[in-house]
Image (spheres, helix red, strand yellow):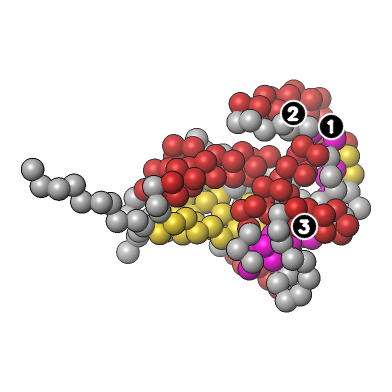
Amino acid sequence: MAPHSPRTPTTRRVEFVLDLVCVHSYLAFTRFERAAARRRADGDRVEVVFRPFQIAPEAPAQGEPLPERHRRDFGTEAERMTRHMAAVGAQEGLRLDFDRAVFVNTLPAHRLLAAAGRQGRAEAMAERLFRAYFTDGANIGDAATLDRLAAQAGVRRGAPDEPDEPDLAAELAKVRAESVRQVPLLRFDTGTALTGAQPEEAYLRALSGPPAH
């Protein structure tokens, strides 16, 4: 019998377009990270590049209670929707506390995530920002809060790692010019693009195919 040949490790590159106050982005991130961990456990490399999107670019810099925003947007359906999403999150091991969340403009958080990417800490930073917003009730537009979250994720703040506002605005415009209208969106170098919060197995399949040519 011929000896078994070891599998050659592969490198996958993924572009993840998201907003940090988008619950579907958080669910997709959680499921994708589990799929990526499975590939990494097999010796593969998974490189993730986060790209910014704002679902509410008009959101206030000072923030407002998320339930107030939900009532304006969804009326009497707001409470039912948040109960449903909290239950979906619980199935993923997430505690989604919509009553505590502070809805805020995400430009500062996207700047921090970009800085984390340049330091090789993007995935850790994204997880901490999502959890801060959806679980801790933290204002992720507040500079002192972002300083604290960055330190917890092992990310240095400030220039030259953080893009300035014009650079971030240009990247947001570039994403829009690519016809991205909703998030999450994950683009794999296998040629697969997945929108919405897909099951973990869908992300695993996308990470397992050959790269597109």
For image coordinates 88% across by 49% down, the residue present is 63
Q: Quadrant of the N terminus?
A: top left
Report whether 175 appears left or right of 21.
left
Report whether 63 appears left or right of 73.
right
Task: Determine contact: label 1, label 2, CB under 8 Å.
Answer: yes
**Residue 51 against residue 56 in the figure, above or below:** below
Which of the 4 image quadrants contains residue 188? Answer: bottom left
Residue that badge 1 annotates? 99
Q: Amino acid at mark 2?
A: Thr
Front disc: 3 or 2: 3
Q: Which mark is residue 151?
A: 3
| Alpha-carbon span between mark 1 and mark 2 | 9 Å
Q: Which residues are magenta?
A: 98-118
Front disc: 1 or 2: 1
Residue that badge 2 annotates? 82
Q: Secondary structure at mark 2?
A: helix
Task: Determine contact: label 3, label 2, CB under 8 Å.
Answer: no
